[in-house]
Amino acid sequence: MAMPALLDYYTADMVRALNEAEPRHWPRYETVHGELLVSPAARPWHQDVAFRLAVALRLYLDREPVGHVRMAPADISWGLPDVLVQPDVFVVPLDEARTLDWRKIRHLLLAVEVLSPSSVRADRFTKRRLYQEQDVGLYWVIDGDARTVEVWTSTDTTPRMEREVLTWHPDGASQPFTFPLDELFRPI
């Protein structure tokens, strides 16, 4: 498929059409307030890091059923006509997950983006600001190459840098989720 013509403004419906027209499922298209974000196929390291985290979250949420973990591709728009994002890993409340309807997913308890060379600006700035606007409880920006994680809440103006362990204690959970970064970034 040829690269779409560059427009000044993209709606969620336009981006859905771009994604549906791509038989390889990449590049992946997203839009944040009309800005088109394009991501090529994920590197293998990106997939390993995202998958490890999703599995750890799934095991945690099986013990602490306060949400449901999902992975990209996704269709998160909060009902906004010019927004459609696909967090690499994210957790939604159980009642929203059980609808099996992307349009009804309006609350992200946790959103995670794993940096790729082409996604740094979008993940650290464009999407982070969107997640803060939408009051996402916690946002992790994982840099697998640097072996660090930026930790953001909806009110932060600067991130907390994590180099040891990821911790998340969602409302309703009796124990926090913890995941050592040595395990997240271990060699294959």
Image (spheres, helix red, strand yellow):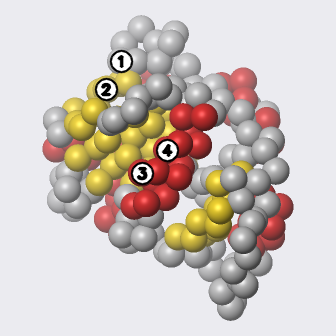
Check disc 4 and report the residue beneath it: 128
How far apart are the alpha carbons under marks 1 and 2? 7 Å
Position of 13 relative to 171 (above/below): below
Q: Is residue 7 visible?
A: yes
Of tags 1 and 3, the one toward the viewer is: 3
Check disc 1 and report the residue beneath it: 176
Of the numbered discs in the image, which one, if any, rests on residue 167? 2
Position of 72 relative to 68 (above/below): below
Q: Secondary structure at mark 3?
A: helix
Mark toward the start of the polypeptide (1 vs 2): 2
Position of 9 relative to 82 (above/below): below
Amino acid at the residue labelled 4: Arg
How far apart are the alpha carbons under marks 2 and 3? 20 Å
User: Residue shown at 80%/67% (left/top)?
Assistant: 14
- Residue 107, quarter of picture: top right
Residue 105 location, x and y as percent? Answer: 72, 36
How far apart are the alpha carbons under marks 3 and 4? 6 Å
Count of all numbered marks drawn on residues in the image: 4
Of the numbered discs in the image, which one, if any, rests on residue 124? 3
**How many other residues sit within 10 Å of disc 2, few (<14), some (14-19) or many (≥20)?**
few
Please say if the residues under marks 1 and 2 sit with CB atoms less than 8 Å apart. yes
Please say if the residues under marks 2 and 4 sit with CB atoms less than 8 Å apart. no
User: Residue shown at 59%/28% (left/top)?
Assistant: 135
